[in-house]
Image (cartoon, rainbow, N blue to C red):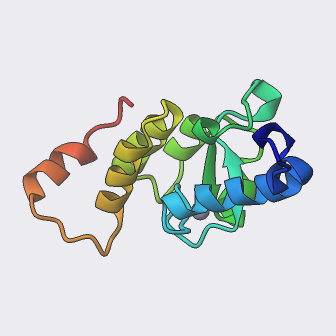
Amino acid sequence: MHIKDAVFLEDLCPKFRFRQWRKSIHRFTGKSCIYCGKPSESIDHVIPRSQGGLSKTENCVPACLSCNGDKSDENALYWYRRQKFYDPRRAMAIRAWLEGDLRLAIRLLQWANPNFKEKNKNYEKDQSEYKAA
Ligand SMILES: [Zn+2]
């Protein structure tokens, strides 16, 4: 049997590939909403499809249903800035994610996680004044 004859499950079943992709997105954040940190139950388009946003990893983030529904088809970066749970570290993470730097995004999210022990309080204070993102 030649390799070109091989039939891959993914090719046979696009839904399977889609499910795997969705799972991998949720895994990046440990299944928590990129905006508020609650359990992620959906995939949100940072730049909505209605504004030309693509369904690729860089534009798709794990989100809880509440954030996803509330945001609707607004640009996530604008929407997020108005939220009560706004955190500049998460805003930076969303931006890094959008730019395809998932490693940086995940580091920022871990840092924004309330369970994450803060070592440098001064730096955190500086960051809370970072509103120009
Ligand atoms: Zn949320």
Q: Residue at x 58, y 37 (%)?
A: 58
Q: Nearer the viewer, residue 96 or 130?
A: 96
From this view, report whether residue 125 is shown above or below residue 112.
above
Q: Nearer the viewer, residue 53 or 83?
A: 53
Q: Nearer the viewer, residue 115 or 11?
A: 11
Q: Position of residue 80 (x, y in %)?
A: 54, 45
Question: In the figure, residue 92 lies in which quadrant?
Answer: top left
Q: Position of residue 97 (x, y in %)?
A: 49, 40
From this view, report whether residue 86 is shown above or below residue 99.
below
Ligand 1 placement by image quarter: bottom right
Q: Residue at x 69, y 49 (%)?
A: 44
Left or right placement of residue 77 versus residue 68 in this view: left
Q: Position of residue 96 (x, y in %)?
A: 42, 36
Screen quadrant of the C terminus: top left
Left or right placement of residue 42 versus residue 93 in this view: right
From this view, report whether residue 125 is shown above or below residue 19.
above
